[in-house]
Amino acid sequence: MSRPPLLVVRDLAVTFPGTGGLRLQAVRGIDLDLNDGEALGVVGESGSGKSVSMLGLLGLLPEQAKVTGSVLFRGQELLGMAPRALQAIRGARIGMIFQDPLTALNPVLRVGEQIVEAIRIHHPGVSRKAAMARAVDLLDLVSIPQPRERVRQYPHEFSGGMRQRVMIAMAVANEPELLIADEPTTALDVTVQAQILELLQDLRSRLGIGLVLITHDLGVVAGTADTVAVMYAGRIVEHGAVDALFEAPRHPYTRGLLAALPTLEVADRPLVGIEGRPPSLRERPSGCAFHPRCAFAQARCRVEMPELRHVGSTWSACHFAETLPPGLDVGTPSPAHAADGGR
Ligand code: SF4
């Protein structure tokens, strides 16, 4: 009998309390699918809902947050699951890597002890000695030199890139089926960033782990993910295979993100930023939330929210996805649009 799919998310929504009894919608109706060994990139600017949606599905948001929809992990519903049962899955079958390893690691505990703790909390029957031997193997797996000596050191004795490798070692310590990495390379310089992404790729192919990579940088997902979901104002606005989406993006926001990426082929062209700022939770624009910043916006965009639908080889939530100019054309903002910064 075949195993249930690794992750199936349907209609995931997250709200937080606002003023006057109203609730603020941080995430609205997210659908995602992930199979074994696949990598999904979730991309968007700050406040797009990418991290909140992942924390929501893992039950890691504060109590005031209300999470609705369905999150099936191997066919098991995570939303509404008893806290103890959810804890048994998190850190064991689902590993997590966070942005800042310095705050995620305990500064007064040796690195080896922290890995031992991560193993024994889920496998209390494993002896300390066996867990420490595994910690050495794990540091070796994530390419930390002299792992036998390194397990005895404290986090401050490691560089930023090495600390992130330790976090990855802890995340895979219990051989998870799914790894969720939230901006794992943001605090690192580009060379170390490339090494960490390569390591994640390597672990994914060697261990067959499904990977969700949350990032604000489309460039990061280009060489790492199979599929990508672009988020804006709490919704997925474009979704598809990485190659197809980079080749022919069907949403103006995705085009804006791509146009802002530096590339070697056009090193002498000025980088094009997206006009305006992402909307705050309290000020979500009507209709298509991207309309105040979109050079292709028309009257309909201000009143009617576009549904995510199949267009060409990707899924796009733009009313005019079929008729956008070809390639990466991001359009030219109207003078009035440009003058007010897209607001
Ligand atoms: Fe732009 Fe309208 Fe498409 Fe939204 S629906 S992305 S405002 S053209």
Image: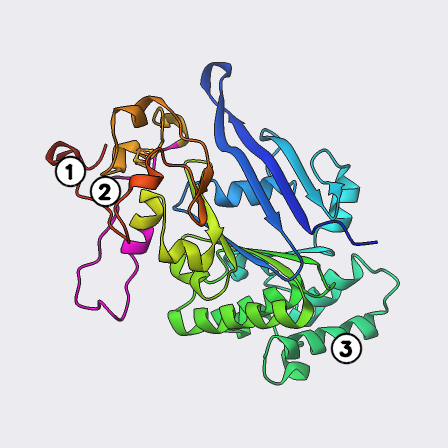
Mark drawn on residue 285: none
Please determine whether, in this image, residue 152 is positioned above or below residue 70: below
Q: Is mark 2 within 8 Å of ligand 1?
A: no
Q: Looking at the image, is mark 1 or mark 3 earlier in the sequence?
A: 3
Q: Mark 2 points at which residue?
A: 275
Q: Residue furthest top?
A: 20
Quarter of the rendered structure image containing ligand 1:
top left
Please determine whether, in this image, residue 190 is positioned above or below residue 60: below
Secondary-structure class at tag 1: helix
Between residues 205 and 250, which one lies in front from this camera angle?
Answer: 250
**Residue type of the residue flagged with mark 1:** Ala
Please determine whether, in this image, residue 150 is positioned above or below residue 189: below
Q: Report the magenta residues as a range.
A: 257-280
Secondary-structure class at tag 2: loop
Residue 96, image x, y percentages: 62, 55
Residue at 34% x, 27% y is 285
User: Decide: marks 1, 2 in contact (CB < 8 A)?
Assistant: yes
**Residue type of the residue flagged with mark 2:** Glu
Q: Which residue lies furthest to the bottom in this view?
A: 146
Q: Looking at the image, is mark 1 or mark 2 earlier in the sequence?
A: 2
